Amino acid sequence: MKLKKIIVFACIFLCAAILSGCELKLGTNPKVDPKLVVAKPTRLCFTGELDITFEEFNKEYLFYLNANGMDEETSDAETCRTLRESIINNQIYEKIMMLKAKEFGCDTLTDEEAQEVQKEFESEIEDQITSLGENADYSDLSEGTEITDEMKKERGEQEFNKLLEKCGMVREDIYGWIKNYYISQKMLNYYLDKVDKTESENMLNEYIEEIKTIYETDPATYEQGGYSTFWIPEGSRYIKHVLLGFDDETQEAIKKYRDEDNDEAANQLREEKAAELADKQAEVEKALDDGEKWDDILLEYSADAAGSSAYPDGYLVVPNGQSYVKEFQKAAFVPENVGDRTVCISDYGVHIMIYASKAEITEEQKNDILDYLSYNIAQNDLSEDMSKWNEDYAFDIDKEALRIEEEESSN
């Protein structure tokens, strides 16, 4: 888990290069007292529990600038203003999330969770120190000096400490971000536990009916839309193939005949070229009969090795499909039993095709889909509540101190 996955509140993403070692330029408002409260709720009083100081805000702002190699002298002023606005809104989101987590009993970590947080914290620090050490400037060393792993670690530690100091941070700040991430996940799990599984099932069934309509009216849209994750038409199958491809010159000649509506000449040419591949076809068939490794056969013979390798189960072919050339589509349904083979010729070459397996959504896959839908429902429910709570607290933001007023065009 990297920091960009930990700081999940709205759109703050502290990427893996967050401690890249870039020099930080002016990223603060020097006229503002670090202890000044720049955001606080107005409708409900929490005696400062939700207050955000300029110091809290500025840590994340400086971190984000550094993470993206930005500074206020050279970066677009509006980009920086938008970033500041985004950060304060995200911090408000985080404050509310942590308060509600406490209210719902999600703010306390179990011993196992605490150990996981500590482990992630230590791993994150080590990764950043290693990265800084690898990318540090060693020009101050004598020419020819061998840079050892120990030296890299020491230099990385130095650069890491420098960066924290520039951002007004200590290591515990990073620990806090990681801990808050885990608490936010516990909040999401709290909502997930409340999701009625029937709701997920009904949602899936409704979605499947929509997908069926798409397939019946426009099979190509079904094939290209990724809908097979949720529903696969009955009779569909996975097909593996070895393509003994025609050379480029032959393919161009066939295409030229097609463009001229001379299908007879195109078909004759490809039949002639396919006959020339008979010996190679026999080699492939024998290799398959002998049980040689599929990947080895692909690499040695197939012009479609890369594409086939990307689909280890085979290509999904559905009845009435339109994504494949018509010869391939038709031949895919010739084999009667799983494991049977057939051969077809297309404008691209000779296809040696294997009926790899039936294509259907398994019970395990269906359960995964239902879990996914339940997760989305929980996320949506939490998001709706967060919006309501945000309105309830009605945070007042010191836009002048944070320089986020729309009319400002410079920093």
Image (cartoon, grey):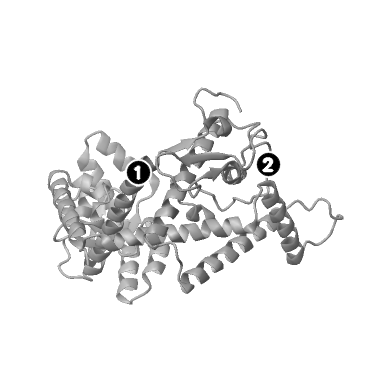
Expressed as whole percent of the image width and height from the top left, the position of residue 121 reads 57, 63
- The three-letter amino acid code for the residue at tag 1 is Ser
Q: Which structural element holds mark 2? A: loop
**16 with respect to 249 (left or right):** right
C-beta proximity under 8 Å, tags 1 and 2: no
Check disc 2 and report the residue beneath it. 24
Which residue in the structure is indicated by mark 1?
A: 387
Position of residue 321 relative to residue 120, above or below, is above
Q: Nearer the viewer, mark 1 or mark 2?
A: 1
Instruction: Assign the C terminus to one quadrant of the image.
Output: top right
From where the camera sits, is residue 313 visible? yes
The outermost residue toward the bottom is 290
Q: Quadrant of residue 298?
A: bottom left
Residue drawn at (60%, 65%) of the image:
122
Residue drawn at x 43%, y 53% is 99
Depth check: 174 or 263 in front?
A: 174
Q: CA distance from mark 1 to mark 2?
A: 34 Å
The answer to whether residue 93 is above or below residue 157 is: above
